[in-house]
Image (spheres, rainbow, N blue to C red):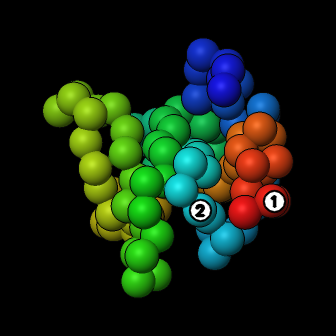
Amino acid sequence: VKLPRTSRQMSSFTSRISINDVQKGDLLFFTGRSASSKTVGHVTMVIDTTGGQIKMMHSSSRGIVIDSYPNSYYGKRFLHAGRIPELENLLSWN
């Protein structure tokens, strides 16, 4: 799977989906450090959705980390969820 380099480009590349429909491999897009911004500045990948809790993996100043969503930091910065087109094709036959 090839993805664009920046979070903003990745956002444009994906098909938007509801946060309630995310699956492993989907991407969540957030503002950068400013919660009031409406511009994509950070992206995470969903790695688990068991029990209604979303676990996401992403790069931060702490390195590669796993966080839950929603949480106090990312909950107010969430913009939208997206599915990679090639992943959408794989999920449809599953």
Nearer to us of marks 2 and 1 is: 1
Q: Residue at x 41, y 83 (%)?
A: 51
Q: Amino acid at mark 2?
A: Gln
Q: Amino acid at mark 1?
A: Ser
Residue 76 is situated, as x and y percent measured from the top left of the image, at 46, 61
- Above/below status of 37 relative to 5: below
Labels 2 & 1 near each other (Cβ < 8 A): no
Residue beneath disc 1: 92
User: Quarter-wise, where is residue 40 in the image?
Assistant: top right
Q: Residue at x 60, y 51 (%)?
A: 26
Q: Residues within 10 Å of mark 1 (few under 14, many from 20)?
A: few
Residue beneath disc 2: 23
User: Quarter-wise, where is residue 2 in the image?
Assistant: top right
Q: Is residue 92 left or right of residue 3?
A: right
Sooner in the amino-acid sequence: mark 2 or mark 1: 2
Q: Residue at x 60, y 16 (%)?
A: 5
Q: Quadrant of the C terminus?
A: bottom right
